[in-house]
Every structure is written in C-alpha cells, then in structure tokens.
Image (cartoon, rainbow, N blue to C red):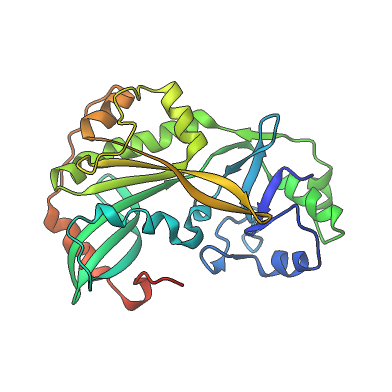
C-alpha cells in the first residue's frame, strides 16, 4: 500500500480507471483549481499529495493546507466567533491578505451592504515533511501501470514528518499576529490537525491553554481529526482550545509587541469583498 494516502483528494486505497483522468487533470477538489504544489524541476506537473502515512501504523497526516478546505468546515466552525454577525449579513472568505508581520491565510468576514461588520482571521497549518514524497507517488502510479517517473519510482529515498518545524513555524507566526488581533478586539483561529496540536502541547508550554475554548479569548485552536467515512477521509473538528496573546507568547517563552489599528483591517477587507468570495452552502 502506498504511503501517499490521498492524491488529488482521492484515497489511494481505491483502484480504477479514474486515476488516469485525475493525474492528467491535476485538479484539487478542495479549491476546484489546479493543484498548487508543483515540481520545481517542471512546474507543469502538480504533485497532488494531500495526506501521507506516518509512523509504524501509517496514520494519516495532512501535508497540504488546502486539504483543510473540505466542505468549508474550517469557516463554518468559526462563525460563532463573529460576535457582531447578525442574520441577513453576508459571509465572505477572503484568502491571503497581507498584514504587518506577514499575511493571514483567510479572513471570514461578516458584511452588510459592502460594509464589514465583523471578521475572524484563520491560519491553516499542515505537516511539513522531511525528504520527498515524490518517489512514493511515482511508485503508486507505476503499480497502476500509468505514466510515471521511472527513476523516481526506483528511488529508496525516505520521507518523514518534520514535527518540530511544523510546530515552531506556526507558533512563531501566531506570536507575530495575535497581539494585533487582541488589541482590536478580534479573534484569530489556527486550524490544524489534532496530531500536530498534541505535539505542540507535549513539546512547548501549553499548560495554561484552556482545555475548553473560551469565547472571550483572542487565540483559538481548532484541532481536526482525519477519520474514515464510507471509504473516504473526512475532516472532523476534534477539539477547541483557546488562550490570549500573552498565552501564545508563553508557549514560546517570548513577549509580543506589534499592534495595528482596526481601521487598517476594515479598509483592506472591504476593498476585497466580492460576490465570488461570498460563502454559500454548496
């Protein structure tokens, strides 16, 4: 069995003629666009790996952030944090918005007549890998008798999960941004996999993080499990935790100071509101 557990959103445990179309089309089912993970040596080839197996039991680990977009789950699970949202308001999802100190993966925005009423920032973190998943992908295609990279398929280069890099990267990013959100009275959400949160809890100082999320906290951890439902992997919210800006700093043993005013966010978000990014149940 391949250690690539999902390729272009499809479980590799399924065989059939559809694989030829999937690997030719290279479409990500979660964004409905071409998979953005491409080969450095050939940008026309999308890698397409969403989930890989890790550890002795080959448990599923999400390695692509777009995998978290399944059924718009991460946005629907954050609506309650829009404390000024009212029935009749439109909901918009605005991706990749630059803010001082970096960018926010997504903003979930409540708007009425083109004016922002409330918003929540959402960061997404998958698992970084050590080594390359490419040979595993090519061996999978070889076994299906589909076109593949013959040299890569013969490679014995291993890959693993870089737990430390995955955790440290996102915690540093949260540290840079959370005080600004707290200063303007808004919430920031981290959507991650439950296994990554468990690693952070073990390796960093998380004793002060609330076991049950508190609405008043500025930093919310939404930890998702990847379960199997009718032969497909399904993203399900496993737990919610929360803390504040000082709590994120304590996780890293640091202090934070960057602040930006609310008007800065409102201007950028109102300029980005479009019918295309309005959230709707499909």
Q: Is there any visible trace of residue 131 in the rendered image? A: yes
**How far from the left and from the top, in percent, is residue 129?**
59, 38
Q: Residue at horizontal 18%, vertical 77%?
A: 113
Horizontally, residue 229 falls left or right of residue 171, namely right
**How far from the left and from the top, in percent, is residue 156?**
79, 36
Q: Residue at horizontal 31%, vertical 60%?
A: 108
Dividing the image into 4 quarters, which one contains the N terminus? Answer: top right
Location of residue 19 (image quadrant): bottom right
Q: Residue at horizontal 49%, vertical 49%?
A: 236
**How far from the left and from the top, in percent, is residue 269?**
23, 64
Horizontally, residue 23 falls left or right of residue 274, namely right
Horizontally, residue 31 falls left or right of residue 239, namely right
Q: Is there any visible trace of residue 39 in the rendered image? A: no
**How far from the left and from the top, in percent, is residue 198?**
47, 30
Camera-nearest residue between 55 and 106: 55
Q: In this view, does 107 lie above or below 114?
A: above
Q: Is residue 209 above or below residue 25?
A: above
């Amino acid at each position: 069995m391949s250690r690539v557990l999902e390729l272009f959103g499809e479980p590799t445990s399924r065989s059939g003629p559809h694989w030829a179309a999937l690997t030719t089309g290279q479409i990500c089912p979660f964004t409905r666009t071409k998979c953005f993970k491409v080969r450095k040596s050939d940008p026309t080839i999308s890698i397409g790996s969403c989930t890989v197996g890790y550890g002795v039991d080959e448990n599923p680990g999400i390695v692509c952030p777009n995998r978290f977009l399944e059924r718009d789950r991460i946005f629907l699970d954050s609506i309650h944090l829009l404390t000024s949202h009212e029935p009749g308001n439109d909901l918009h999802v605005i991706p990749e918005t630059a803010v001082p100190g970096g960018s926010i993966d997504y903003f979930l925005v409540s708007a009425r007549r083109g004016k922002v009423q409330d918003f929540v920032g959402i960061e997404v973190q998958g698992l970084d890998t050590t080594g390359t998943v490419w040979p595993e992908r090519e061996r999978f295609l070889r076994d299906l008798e589909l076109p593949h990279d013959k040299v890569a398929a013969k490679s014995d280069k291993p890959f693993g999960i870089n737990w430390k890099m995955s955790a440290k990267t996102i915690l540093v990013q949260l540290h840079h941004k959370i005080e600004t959100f707290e200063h303007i009275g808004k919430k920031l959400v981290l959507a991650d996999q439950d296994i990554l949160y468990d690693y952070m809890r073990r390796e960093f100082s998380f004793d002060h993080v609330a076991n049950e999320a508190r609405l008043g906290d500025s930093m919310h951890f939404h930890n998702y499990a990847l379960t199997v439902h009718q032969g497909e992997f399904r993203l399900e919210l496993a737990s919610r935790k929360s803390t504040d800006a000082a709590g994120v700093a304590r996780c890293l043993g640091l202090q934070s100071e960057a602040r930006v005013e609310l008007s800065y966010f409102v201007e950028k978000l109102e300029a980005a509101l479009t019918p295309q990014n309005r959230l709707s149940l499909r």
